[in-house]
Structure formats: structure tokens, C-alpha cells
Amino acid sequence: MSDNIETIGYRELGASSSDSNKVLRNTYWLLALTLIPTVLGAWFGIATGVSYYLSGGLGMIFFIAGAFGFVYAIEKNKDSAVGIAFLLGFTFFMGLMLSRLIAMVLGFKNGTELVMTAFGGTAGVFFIMASLASVIKRDLSNMAKWLFVGVMVLMVASIINIFVGSGPGMMVISVLSIGIFSAFMLYDIKRIIDGGETNYISATLALYMNAINIFQSLLSLLGILGGDSE
């Protein structure tokens, strides 16, 4: 009898592990796909210059309204292909919103190098966090509340800095953002591996938000510290 129970337990564990691996694999594929509309959105914003009209308070309102609208639509349709369509639309929107920063950095003599460095750095962070998540055995669920508090602090600090316009303040915010969203990336990947997230569209949305925030913060930091205007 005990042997039968043990066998059933192993089967359930194997099935659970298989499901988690499938979600993780689909998440990684969809995350890679999101790069295409993101790049297209950034190119469109730079080519048309539309992002320059979305700066300051107006840009913040447009971004918040657009981001929350897309996130709501994605989560509402996360069990169908419509959710993927909304996700890809959201990544185009995010590329558009990033285009102003990218255009500013590309204005430097070494701008292309800085953009590629930020992209490579983001990919490197993702690889490190994914590797750590695969070997860490402890439960990381307790991180969630602290990371949420960190994101709230970042949001308030970012809004204040829009009006203050402090260069050192932007550097501090960027460094903190890289650290917080790297930790969030570790938490989200570990959650998929542990079976806490079973929907790959929601999982992709979470990892994409982590990655785009890390990229933006790295690019801002590199632009401030390494931009060559000569």
C-alpha cells in the first residue's frame, strides 16, 4: 500500500515538474517574440518624433493610462490568443515610450554602443537570474511584499524627479531600479519553476516588465555616465 502511495506521489511530482517546464519554455519563447514589436515601436517613435510630444506630466499620464489599459486587457484575455495580441501590442507601446530616451542616447557619438551595452547588460542579468532560479531551493515568496514596497518607492521618487530634474537623483533611481527589478526577475522565474504561475502569458508579461525596466535604467545610467557628446 505504501509503495502504491509513493508511486502516485512521484507521478504527481513528475507531472507538476513537466507542466512547470512547459510554462517556462513557452514563456521564454513568447518573451523572445516581444522583442520584435518593442524594436518596431522604438523605431516608429524615433522616425516620427511622436515621443517628444509625450514628455513631462502629459507623457506620464499617457503612459500610466496606456500601461494599465494594456495590462488589464492582457490579464482578462490571458487564456486565449487575444491575450498574446494584447501583449504584443503592449510591447509596441513600451517601445514607443522608450523611443525618446533611445533617441537621446543615440544622439551621443557612442550612442549605438551604449544602446547595445544596455541590451547586453539586460540579457546578462536575465541569464544570471534564470540560472540562480534554477538552483535555489528555498521558497522566495516572502520577497514579494518587500519588492512591491520597493517599486512603490521607485514610482514616487521617479515622479518627484520629473519635476526636480536632478541628475544625481536619476542615477540613484536607476541603480535602485536595476537592483529591484533584477530581484523581481529572480522571484518571477522561481515562481514559474515552483508552479506558482501556470499561465505563460501572465508570466511573460511579468518578465517583460522586469526586463524593460532594467534596460531603461541601464540605458539612463550609461547615458549619464558614458555619453560622449564630442
Image (tube, rainbow, N blue to C red):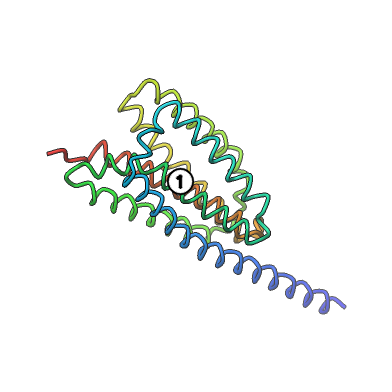
Which residue is painted at 52% across and 58% down in the image? Answer: 133
Please tell me whether mark 1 sits on a helix, a strand or a loop. helix
Query: Which of the image's four quarters has the C terminus?
Result: top left
Three-letter amino acid code of the residue under disc 1: Met
Q: Nearer the viewer, residue 187 or 59?
A: 59
Q: Nearer the viewer, residue 135 or 226?
A: 226
Q: Is residue 69 above or below residue 87?
A: above
Q: Is residue 47 above or below residue 224?
A: below
Q: Classify mark 1: residues with Cα within 10 Å, few (<14), some (14-19) or many (20+).
A: many
Q: Is residue 195 left or right of residue 87?
A: right
Find residue 151 and report its horizontal and vertical position in percent.
52, 36
Residue at the disc numbered 1:
94
Q: Of all residues shown, which one is farthest toward the top?
A: 164
Q: Of all residues shown, which one is farthest toward the front?
A: 48
Query: Which of the image's four quarters has the N terminus?
Result: bottom right
Q: Of all residues shown, which one is farthest toward the left?
A: 230
Find residue 75 and report its horizontal and vertical position in percent.
65, 50
Which residue is painted at 49% across and 36% down in the image? Answer: 63
